[in-house]
Image: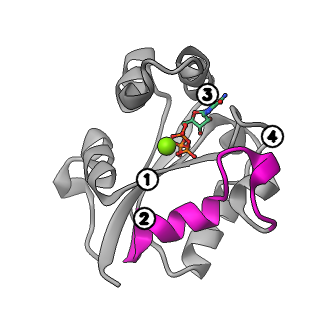
Amino acid sequence: MALERTLSIIKPDAVAKNVIGEIYSRFEKAGLKVVAAKMKHLSKQEAEGFYAVHRERPFFAALVEFMISGPVMVQVLEGEGAMLKNRELMGATNPKDAAPGTIRADFADSIDANAVHGSDSLENAAIEIAYFFPATDVYAR
Ligand code: RTP
Ligand code: MG
């Protein structure tokens, strides 16, 4: 497996539940390192741009409204196979389908308020990391 970087967002629901640390602990226990991080209250424009691939989906407006409902924690995770490893830690999009012990099974309330985002391909990871962090703000570790 190759050393990869992926973008993770702890969404407004999980930030409000005060479980940033618990989620970071799961990343660390799985061997993923936080190599960039910031808390941010996204503007509508930033959220729409981030989820632009979903622009035509029926849930787009609700998704954007949710993502700007409070601050989020945005981080770059680095590790062997980081993109898929993070997706495994997150669990399925709908927490009802998420495997026990995953972040969404433990912290998500619904398909809308589902605790975390993770890049779904290495190509998208590179785009999403650049969306939030200049290269100089991502630290090799
Ligand atoms: P994310 O992008 O947030 O990491 O989630 P994901 O890959 O697991 O799911 P994706 O298909 O990319 O959808 C993005 C977010 O939109 C909301 N969604 N709602 N009502 C629905 O049918 C529906 N489908 C997706 C979810 O909040 C999902 O995380
Ligand atoms: Mg997605």
Earlier-in-chain disc, 1 versus 4: 4
Please identify the quarter of the rendering in which residue 83 is found. bottom left
Residue type, label 3: Gly
What segment carries the magenta color?
Answer: 77-100
SS for dot 1: loop
Asked if the beta carbon under badge 2 is closer than 8 A to the nearest atom of ligand 1, the reply is no
Nearer the N terminus, badge 2 or badge 1?
Answer: 2
Q: Residues within 10 Å of mark 1 (few under 14, many from 20)?
A: some
Q: Which residue is mark 2?
A: 83
Would you name the residue on which mark 4 appears?
109
92 part of magenta stretch: yes
Look at the image and tell me in which quarter the C terminus lies: bottom left
Query: Was residue 59 drawn as part of the magenta stretch in this picture?
Result: no
Tell me, yes or no, whether the two marked residues, 2 and 1, touch with CB atoms within 8 Å: yes
Indicate the secondary structure of the residue bearing disc 4: loop
Amino acid type for the residue under numbered disc 4: Asp
In terms of secondary structure, where does tag 3 sit? Answer: loop
For residue 120, which numbered disc appears in the image? 1
- Above or below — where is 65 with respect to 83? above
Q: Look at mark 3 in the image and give the residue it sits on.
A: 70
- Horizontally, is 121 left or right of 117 in the view? left
Question: Which disc, if any, is residue 93?
Answer: none
